[in-house]
Every structure is written in structure tokens, then in C-alpha cells.
Amino acid sequence: AQSVTQPDIHITVSEGASLELRCNYSYGATPYLFWYVQSPGQGLQLLLKYFSGDTLVQGIKGFEAEFKRSQSSFNLRKPSVHWSDAAEYFCAVAINTGGFKTIFGAGTRLFVKA
Amino acid sequence: EAQVTQNPRYLITVTGKKLTVTCSQNMNHEYMSWYRQDPGLGLRQIYYSMNVEVTDKGDVPEGYKVSRKEKRNFPLILESPSPNQTSLYFCASRFIGAEGGYTFGSGTRLTVV
């Protein structure tokens, strides 16, 4: 069955430190891949997406993600975290079921230490 | 401004009292969907619609109804709410080709007592 795994339920990093959030998916082909961010009390906002081409994609707020087909991974990175990045991050895939079903991971909550 | 508007943001109701959560988008998106978000379970799809008058069940449709009479609106109806429907609900929309990703509403926090 298709699935999205975010192995880390929560991560704490110091402000200014680098960040990597992990995401693995299970699907027979290359899906469309997304990262969303949810700030407290808000809806989800699209950070970045990948569906073809360069496997390193740039998003908003200084985030980037790299698609690795051999590892079925789409990890999110940021070189220097700001306190305002504290939020929950969701990896998602859209798979072709005739209407492109989107499957979300369970999310990773990011805490930022001063 | 391109957006998905949900109302209300917060709602407390009693078991069995019918309620409707409204959702409207202004981006001419064909595809609209309702999700519920529960701690530890991520987002689970309740219902979706690929266009006007075309709706289908998601992963957790029991106890919910939807309709899509106009392209911009996709209300979620709970005809007889129960406490296990206490949750955070999100409406989202996108174009039929999924590569653009979703635009989400701000959410409706529903409590059923």
C-alpha cells in the first residue's frame, strides 16, 4: 500500500543551526512530492514541490528539498533555522489513481531553541 | 487574494445536532477536498470532489456528507454529529492535475459534546 513516512515525530534545533527533516514514501512510480508547513492555529502552506526535472528544488522561506529516487526519499533542508520556523511540517505525495490522491505523512514538529 | 475560506473557525455543538461547515475558493480549482486532522494521525481525507456534481468518498467518510453544486463551494455536512467527530477540519483545493499542490483553508476546530 502507498504510504508516506516521516520518522521523526519532533525535532529540536538551535537557532542558526542547519535542519534536515526526513521523508520516505512507498509507491511503485515517482509521485508528485510536496512539503507543507503548518504554523500554530493555521492551515497548511505549501513550501515546495517536485514532479520532474532537477532533483534539488527550492521553496519559500529558504527551504530546499532533494528527491532521491533510489532511496524513495524527499528530505527537507534549511541551512540556518530561524525561531519563526518552529511549526509542524508535513511531507505529502500525490499518486495517480485516476484523480491524483494525496497522501500525507504524520508530520514532524520542529522546536527551535534560542 | 487567492484563498480558501472556511467558516466557522471554531464550533462547539451537541451530539445529534446537524451542522454545516462551509468552504469556498476563488481560484477556479476543479478539485476540492475535506480533511480531518487528529493528533498522531496526520491528515485523513473525508470526501473529495473532482468537479461540480462529482463527489467521492475519501478514507474516513462515515458520518459526513458533502455537496458540490457550484465550482467554488464545497460544504461539509454532519447530519448527526458524535463526539468521535471532534477534530480539526481543513478544506483544500487545487487544479485537477496535482502538480501545483493544495491551497488550504485556515481550519475549523469542532467540538462535539
Image (spheres, coloured by chain):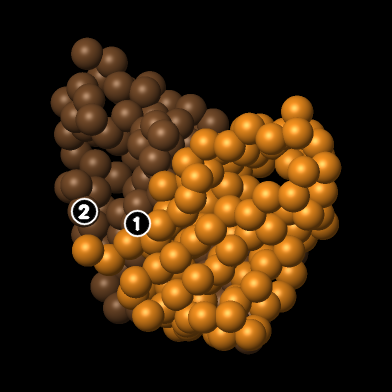
Q: Is residue B51 left or right of residue B105?
A: right
- In the depicted structure, whether residue B25 falls above or below residue A110: below
Q: Quadrant of residue B109?
A: top right
Q: Nearer the viewer, residue A71 or B31?
A: B31
Q: Nearer the viewer, residue A24 or B11?
A: B11
Earlier in the chain: of badge 2 and badge 1, it is 1
Q: Is residue B33 left or right of residue A49?
A: right
Amino acid type at mark 2 = Ile
Residue topped by disc 1: A46
- What chain does badge 1 belong to? A
- In the depicted structure, whether residue B21 falls above or below residue B87: below
Amino acid type at mark 1 = Leu
Q: Quadrant of residue B4?
A: bottom left
Q: Is residue B110 visible?
A: yes
Which SS class for mark 2? helix
Which corner quadrant holds the C terminus of chain A? Answer: top left
Task: Look at chain B in the picture and name its colour.
Answer: orange
**Which disc, if any, is residue B88?**
none
Q: Nearer the viewer, residue A39 or B21?
A: B21
Return the x and y of residue B111 as percentages of the image width and height.
66, 33
**Which disc, if any, is residue A60?**
2
Q: Quadrant of residue A29?
A: bottom right
Which SS class for mark 1? strand
Return the x and y of residue A28 as percentages of the image width and height.
63, 74
Task: Look at chain A in the picture and name its colour.
Answer: brown
Do callouts 2 and 1 mark residues in contact (Cβ within 8 Å)? yes
Q: Nearer the viewer, residue B99 or B111?
A: B111
